[in-house]
Image (cartoon, rainbow, N blue to C red):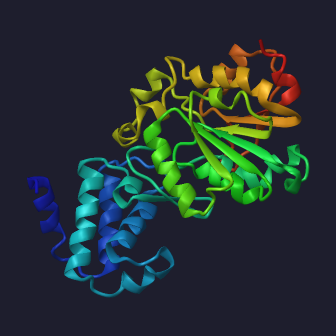
């Protein structure tokens, strides 16, 4: 244990209850400038998650430990997790081996990007407005699936659909396979190791294609907090300008959508770059709760105009 860790252990000697430890953790995470945004909005969400892992209590049962004294095992585990979160800047999701998205739990580790996407709010609320009735959707694709979280959410929402999910990383697909099995969707969610949609080009067409691809330019990646650099770089960066995967996807998707189908791509901060590179391509930017509106929708008809 490092000297910094021993000092922190000294600081916790006066702490007794779960509430004491949570207050301490919140202050420390804030003071040390820990970066959020990998499945958590703030230090309180991360502290509660670490406490859940340390005590074995589900989030809704955590109040049980707020006023009681933690056991030695619980204290030790919580401080250990907190140390690693702060000193090593390991994301909380990796520390506990799981992440939540859309009310579902997924296994995650350093082989995959931590689940987070605007699609979690768009799949049930907005996307269906652009499609035929939900029960008529038969084939859906999730490109750059990572942990498989979005493919699984699609399968849950479109109960009659087969979902094809692709990723270039074989390691990511190993994790996705775990999650597909955990959610008992092996018969409906198929995983493909391929560059964008290459392995899907000879099959049937899709009613819906979505992608949350790597889109950070190299210049942006270099400035990211250390936590984000714990994730696989290939899940974040795509060529110097961030548009590598998107270029391929736009060319491929037009050939793989049914006439009434749509393509949706989450592009982060590349909205201006998208318009600059494809100035004549009609697209709709879907509204999201935080107002960033960084998911674009393009129809099959318009995609076919791309050469």
Front-most of 143 and 22?
143
Residue plotted at (43% across, 41% down) = 171
Q: Position of residue 150 (x, y in %)?
A: 63, 49
Left or right of 291? Residue 133 is: right
Indicate whether 203 appears above or below 27. Answer: above
| Quarter of image, res 199 | top right
Where is residue 253, by image quadrant?
top right
Would you say residue 38 is visible in this rendering?
no
Residue 61: image location, x then y, percent:
47, 82
Counting every numbered tag in the picture gives 0
Extreme-top residue of the structure: 307
Is residue 56 shown left or right of residue 13? right
Q: Quadrant of the N terminus?
A: bottom left
Above or below, 243 against 120 in this view is above
In the rendered view, tell whether residue 263 sits above or below residue 18. above
Say whether residue 179 is left or right of residue 13: right
At x 69% / y 43%, what residue is drawn? Answer: 291
Residue at (42% x, 32% y) in the render:
233
Between 228 and 158, the residue placed more toward the observer is: 158
* Residue at the (24%, 66%) spot, across then down: 79
Picture quadrant of residue 250: top right
Residue 77 drawn at (x, y percent): 25, 69
């Amino acid at each position: 244990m490092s000297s910094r860790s021993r000092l922190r252990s000294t600081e916790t000697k006066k702490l007794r209850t779960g509430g004491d430890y949570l207050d301490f953790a919140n202050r420390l995470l804030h003071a040390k400038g820990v970066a959020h945004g990998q499945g958590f909005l703030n230090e309180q969400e991360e502290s509660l998650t670490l406490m859940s892992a340390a005590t074995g209590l589900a989030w809704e049962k955590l109040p049980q430990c707020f006023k009681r004294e933690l056991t030695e095992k619980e204290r030790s585990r919580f401080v250990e997790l907190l140390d690693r979160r702060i000193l090593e800047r390991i994301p909380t999701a990796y520390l506990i081996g799981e992440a939540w998205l859309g009310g579902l739990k997924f296994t995650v580790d350093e082989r995959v990007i931590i689940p987070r996407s605007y699609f979690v709010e768009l799949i049930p609320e907005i996307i269906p407005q652009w499609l035929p009735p939900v029960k008529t959707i038969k084939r859906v694709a999730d490109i750059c699936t990572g942990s498989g979280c979005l493919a699984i959410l699609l399968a849950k929402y479109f109960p009659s659909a087969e979902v094809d999910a692709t990723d270039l990383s074989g390691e990511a697909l190993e994790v996705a396979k775990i999650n597909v099995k955990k959610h008992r969707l092996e018969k409906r969610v198929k995983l493909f190791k391929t560059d964008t949609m290459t392995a899907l080009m000879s099959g049937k067409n899709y009613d819906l294609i979505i992608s949350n691809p790597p889109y950070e330019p190299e210049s942006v990646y270099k400035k990211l907090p250390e936590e984000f650099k714990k994730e696989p770089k290939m899940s974040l960066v795509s060529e110097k300008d961030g548009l590598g995967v998107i270029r391929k996807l736009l060319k491929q998707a037009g050939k793989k959508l049914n006439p009434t189908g749509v393509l949706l791509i989450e592009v982060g901060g590349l909205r201006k770059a998208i318009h600059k590179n494809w100035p004549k391509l009609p697209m709709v930017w879907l509204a999201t709760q935080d107002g960033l509106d960084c998911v674009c929708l393009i129809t099959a008809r318009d995609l076919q105009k791309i050469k």
